[in-house]
């Protein structure tokens, strides 16, 4: 049965079972296939075909969300019955913001037919290319394709259907314990060039022989796209979350010049609507350094005024709304040009295991990974051992702190299905390295 | 048609399609969670999930396919697809894959559960969370949150070697947290752990936590932290409370002894390990006080089960004995590749995910001391409690942890409260500096251990007690 038919059926059953209730139904069918490789061989190769139905009911001031993967007639009837029973004994929910009104989609999901139909052999071929490009170095990583179709219905008349594809590749090459990395995300498998990614990772790994230790301190840095995607991840989760803002747990202050004027940030969604059935559109979060907007769901919009921006659902209402496809608008400098302007600093490929020390200041600690080099007098001179940093992320992008933004925003995989970060390289005046990774 | 029949149909189809080994898990899981904030419920979920996951081995290559359809025809298709995926894996094939032998079991296992958590009325559970959060606000917290989670999982496992095992695992847990907002920062206090306490138990676990009794203290401590002096920077004697130490064990021991990491299978995503198999049995991991067990048989701990997801029965073994590294967390294929003779640590977080090497209950055996003795015997140091942040390098060596709260320790007494405590170090150097370990062991559970692609959340347990470490760098700041 199609996602539309299931959604219609569940909505009909729920409206009959719970007269007077506000009802929301979303159905998501996911075909997700991921081929992992390590030690230059495919060691895990998985495919899942899942169908999930989510039903949310609000009745007499009480709300419950229920889900099932059982989409036969019996499973759907059971879903509605247990929802009806549970909502009557659920605790009160005074913050219920009401249902999304009928509104058409602003964006169409992008579906690439070849990616939708990709076979295990198609993914294995990309892996083969990556491994071959490494020229004998050990490799590891994954190639993923995904196809999502979704339907949303609510008792206020909202009815949406959409589909999208995704393709991601992420791999490292290893040379005597030194790793190099390359990543790419797209909507089509054809956007992934296994050989090119393998070559980039291999060059990074081979350039790290005999690294030096550097003392802790503040260093001028050039961050490559892989590293910049970590900034986007943390800004997305903690920086532009309207719930965190309303509770004074984040740094963002809309209308304020909080970033360098070289910084423009936007969310460019791949999923055309959110978990509450609000259509998504491209959203500018930072405009030339001025914080312009926050990600909103219906609850934060009801609490703080304004409207939902279509960001409900990624982590649930307790965490609050987050952008899933955050990106920096590109600038005008290549990495080579950035490096040429550094008197003494670091070229950093990737950041690793970053964790928030304080969400209000967005203070993070983490480590460098997959390639760090010393820059002296405009030239990359020596590989450097990994270092730990403890850094306020907004401070790193503050007015005057951004010296250049890269020319290409490279789509980087995220850990959320259909999520991605558009990351250019960044040249920053200062990054706080607090210790060598070896002690 | 029973769920065993469904799984057997999938295995038979995989063999018919050319697999030399296959297994299948039918799983049915009910999950319930509730979040409350500042006296109101903000999210309530009740989920049901069922499906079948099939693993097939062709030559030296694996395939896995999962589908939420439990009909005979769907199961047979799943088996055939798993085999086809395994054949595609052979395009970039590796060395021969074998499986270490295991006893072929036809068995049933159920975890102990005195109070069925799904049968506790939602209104009672809601009252508990809303009262706890309201109490924290009344005592000064700007944001007060509470949550519980419940998992009720049935599994039916069948393999081409003859396994036929069904298990019923019930798990739950809960926690509360108070946040106070200052001029430029936030301060947080949690009970009993930063993301709650969990076990393979019924609702009796939550009742035993007595969340309401701790709510006022948490709120008052979070507010007091806003004006407490900063944790000083430098090298000192560090005493860790058991909740922080369990995460230290998890990150710097548990993940390091995962055989798939040691073999490089997780290199790109989760990282590798500093451990070298050639040193198994001889490497000094920590001081002689350090005895770490891998023990999924512990009653009530979150990493407990009867059989892992390859059908290997739960059994206790040592990972570190008298400070020497002696064991790993392994699966049947990783163990065979490494030349070891045991598996038993393979699990997945659902029917749609590939089983992989995961922590079970990895934790410390008791030491000879008490926390009171440890503090009494410390002239100058810092006592830190409750995890706030965690980060460790890709070889599981260089770590930095932040805690919610600390106290200075002077002349054998706990002194003033300190804010923003952090400590950093290198795994083996840190563990070798452990010179006092309490006998006050508690089992801590974490339900959100991330690993694998697509991502999986592992449920792990960690026996832990207060301990003391010498010459540790503390007070690292942005």
Image: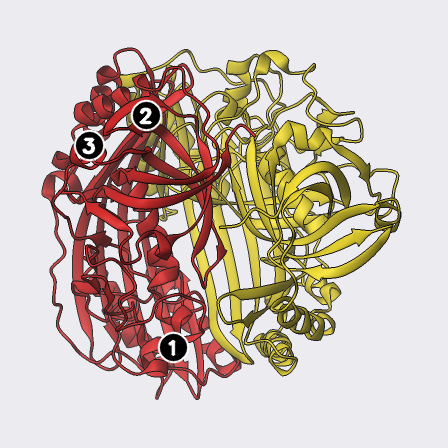
Cα separation between marks 2 and 3: 22 Å
Q: Which colour scheme is used?
A: by chain
Cα separation between marks 1 and 3: 59 Å
Along the viewing direction, whichever of A72 and A428 lies nearer the viewer: A428
In percent of width and height, residue B406 lies at 69, 56
Residue depicted at 39% across the width and 60% down the height:
A238
Nearer to us: label 2 or label 3 = 3
Q: Mark 1 lies on which chain?
A: A
In percent of width and height, residue A183 lies at 26, 35
Residue depicted at 64% across the width and 66% down the height:
B225
Residue wearing tag 1? A57
Residue wearing tag 2? A180
- Letter of the chain shown red in the rendering: A
Q: In the rendered image, is residue B304 in sight? A: no
Badge 1 element: strand
Residue depicted at 12% across the width and 62% down the height:
A107
Cα separation between marks 1 and 2: 49 Å
Q: Which mark is residue A340?
A: 3
Q: Looking at the picture, does residue A301 appear above or below residue A30?
A: below
**Earlier residue among tags 1 and 2:** 1
Q: Looking at the picture, does residue B414 appear above or below residue B210?
A: above
Report if the CB atoms under discs 1 and 2 are less than 8 Å apart. Answer: no
Q: Looking at the picture, does residue A122 appear above or below residue B199?
A: above
- Letter of the chain shown yellow in the rendering: B
Along the viewing direction, whichever of A142 and A322 lies nearer the viewer: A322
Q: Which mark is residue B273?
A: none
């Amino acid at each position: 049965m199609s996602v539309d038919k299931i959604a219609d059926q569940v909505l009909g059953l729920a409206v009959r079972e719970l007269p007077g209730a506000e009802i929301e139904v979303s159905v998501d069918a996911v075909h997700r296939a991921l081929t992992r490789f390590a030690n230059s061989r495919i060691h895990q190769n998985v495919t899942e075909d899942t169908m999930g139905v989510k039903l949310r009911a609000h009745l007499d001031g009480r709300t419950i969300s229920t889900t099932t993967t059982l989409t036969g007639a019996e499973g759907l009837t059971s879903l509605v019955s247990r929802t009806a029973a549970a909502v009557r004994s659920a605790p009160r929910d005074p913050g219920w913001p009401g249902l999304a009104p009928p509104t058409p989609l602003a964006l169409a999901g992008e579906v690439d037919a070849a990616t939708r139909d990709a076979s295990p052999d198609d993914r294995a071929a990309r892996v083969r290319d990556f491994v071959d490009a490494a020229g004998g170095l050990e490799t590891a990583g994954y190639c993923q394709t995904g196809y999502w179709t979704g339907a949303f219905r609510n008792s206020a008349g909202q009815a949406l259907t959409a589909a999208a594809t995704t393709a991601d590749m992420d791999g490292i090459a290893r040379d005597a314990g030194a790793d190099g990395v390359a990543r790419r995300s797209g909507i089509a498998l054809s956007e992934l060039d296994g050989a090119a990614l393998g070559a980039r990772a291999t060059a990074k790994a081979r350039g790290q022989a005999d690294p030096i230790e550097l003392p802790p301190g503040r260093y001028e840095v050039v961050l490559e796209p892989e590293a910049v995607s970590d900034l986007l991840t943390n800004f997305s989760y903690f920086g532009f979350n309207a719930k965190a803002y309303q509770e004074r747990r984040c740094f963002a202050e809309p209308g304020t010049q909080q970033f360098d004027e070289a910084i423009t940030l936007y969310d460019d969604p791949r999923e055309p609507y959110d978990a509450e059935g609000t259509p998504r559109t491209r959203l500018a979060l930072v405009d030339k350094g001025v914080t312009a907007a926050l990600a909103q769901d219906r609850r934060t919009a009801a609490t703080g005024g304004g409207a939902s921006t279509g960001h409900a659902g990624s982590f649930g209402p307790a965490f609050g709304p987050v952008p899933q496809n955050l990106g920096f608008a590109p600038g005008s400098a290549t990495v080579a040009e950035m490096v040429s302007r550094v008197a003494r600093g670091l070229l950093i490929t990737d950041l690793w295991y970053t964790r928030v020390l304080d969400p209000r200041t967005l203070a993070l600690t983490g480590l460098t990974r997959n390639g760090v080099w010393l820059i002296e007098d405009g030239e990359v001179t020596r590989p450097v051992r990994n270092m730990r940093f403890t850094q306020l992320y907004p401070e790193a992008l503050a007015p005057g702190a951004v010296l250049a933004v890269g020319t290409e925003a490279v789509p980087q995989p995220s850990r959320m299905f259909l999520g991605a970060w558009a990351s250019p390289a960044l040249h920053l005046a200062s990054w706080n390295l607090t210790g060598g990774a070896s002690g | 048609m029973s769920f065993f029949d469904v799984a057997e149909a999938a295995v038979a189809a995989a063999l018919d399609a050319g697999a030399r080994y296959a297994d299948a898990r039918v799983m049915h899981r009910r999950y319930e969670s509730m979040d409350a904030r500042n006296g109101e419920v903000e999210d309530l979920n009740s989920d049901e999930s069922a499906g079948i996951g099939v693993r097939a081995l062709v030559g030296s290559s694996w395939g896995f396919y999962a589908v939420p359809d439990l009909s005979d025809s769907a199961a047979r298709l799943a088996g055939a697809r798993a085999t086809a995926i395994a054949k595609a894996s052979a395009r970039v094939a590796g060395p021969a894959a074998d499986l270490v032998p295991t006893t072929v079991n036809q068995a049933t296992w159920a975890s102990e559960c005195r109070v069925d958590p799904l049968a506790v009325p939602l209104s009672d559970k809601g009252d508990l969370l809303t009262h706890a959060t309201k109490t924290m606000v009344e005592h000064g917290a700007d944001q007060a949150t509470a949550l519980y989670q419940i998992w009720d999982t049935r599994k039916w496992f069948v393999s081409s070697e003859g396994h036929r095992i069904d298990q019923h695992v019930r798990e739950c847990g809960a926690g509360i947290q108070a946040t106070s907002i200052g001029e430029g920062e936030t301060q947080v206090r949690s009970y009993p752990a930063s993301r709650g306490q969990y076990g393979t138990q019924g609702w009796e676990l939550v009742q035993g936590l007595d969340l309401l009794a701790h709510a006022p203290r948490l709120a008052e401590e979070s507010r007091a932290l806003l004006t407490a002096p900063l944790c000083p920077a430098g090298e000192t004697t560090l005493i860790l409370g058991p909740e922080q130490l369990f995460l230290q064990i998890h990150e710097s021991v548990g993940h390091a002894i995962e055989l798939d990491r040691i073999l490089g299978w997780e290199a790109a995503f989760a990282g590798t390990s500093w451990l070298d198999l050639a040193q198994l049995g001889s490497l000094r991991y920590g001081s002689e006080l350090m005895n770490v067990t891998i023990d999924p048989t512990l009653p009530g701990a979150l990493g407990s089960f009867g059989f892992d997801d390859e059908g290997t029965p739960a059994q206790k073994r040592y990972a570190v004995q008298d400070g020497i590294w002696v064991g790993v967390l392994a699966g049947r294929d990783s163990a065979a590749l490494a030349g070891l003779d045991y598996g038993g640590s393979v699990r997945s977080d659902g029917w749609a995910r590939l089983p992989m090497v995961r922590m079970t209950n990895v934790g410390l055996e008791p030491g000879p001391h008490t926390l009171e003795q440890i503090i009494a015997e410390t002239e100058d140091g810092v006592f830190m409690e409750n995890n706030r942040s965690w980060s460790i390098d890709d070889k599981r060596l260089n770590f930095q942890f932040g805690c919610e709260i600390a106290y200075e320790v002077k002349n054998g007494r706990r002194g003033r409260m300190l804010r923003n405590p952090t400590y950093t170090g290198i795994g083996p150097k840190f563990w070798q500096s452990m010179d006092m370990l309490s006998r006050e062991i508690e089992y801590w559970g974490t339900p959100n251990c991330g690993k694998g692609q697509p991502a999986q959340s592992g449920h792990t347990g960690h026996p832990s007690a207060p301990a003391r470490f010498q010459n540790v760098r503390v007070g690292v700041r942005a």
